[in-house]
Image (cartoon, rainbow, N blue to C red):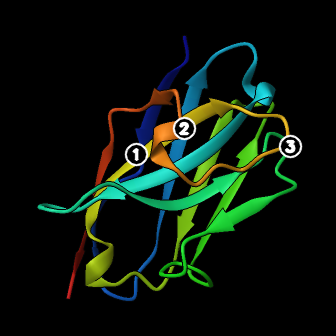
Amino acid sequence: QVQLVESGGGLVQAGGSLRLSCVAATNTFTTYAMGWFRQAPGKEREFVTAVSWNGGSTKYADSVKGRFTISRDNAKKTVYLQMNSLKSEDTAVYYCAAVPARVAVPVSANVYNYWGQGTQVTVSS
């Protein structure tokens, strides 16, 4: 069992930045690929970005490429999501997720085993 706790959400103006953090309560953090997903009101949960166990591989949704950056600090058991040039359409609840994966960087929510409680990001235009 892996407990994930997100933080860093809030209200920001369009064009602004936020950094989300997700701390994992596990002694085997390096055996997990980590992902960020988001869900806007009335919409399905969608993939945002993911990172391999060592940070060597990343994937991004087309809608956030060039604006968002995922990173991880295995010593702190934390994964980060730096969000720049935020747009109103980025407004959503952002979820951190984990899946045992030494190589792959999964993009499907169905693959991930563990989820955080979510943190709200609201971008005002």
| Residue 28 placement (x, y as % from top left) | 76, 17
Residue, x 52% and y 50% (percent of image)?
108
Give residue 95's quadrant in the image: top left
Using residue 27 as the reference point, say whether residue 62 is left or right of it. left
Q: Which mark is residue 111?
A: 2
The residue singled out by tag 3 in the image is 54
Q: Which mark is residue 95?
A: 1
| Residue 24 placement (x, y as % from top left) | 59, 26
Q: Amino acid at mark 2?
A: Val
Q: Secondary structure at mark 2?
A: helix
> Alpha-carbon distance for marks 2 and 3?
19 Å
Residue 25 to residue 51: above or below: above
Nearer the observer: mark 2 or 3; the answer is 2
| Residue 25 placement (x, y as % from top left) | 58, 17
Give residue 89's quadrant in the image: bottom left
Give residue 99's quadrant in the image: top right
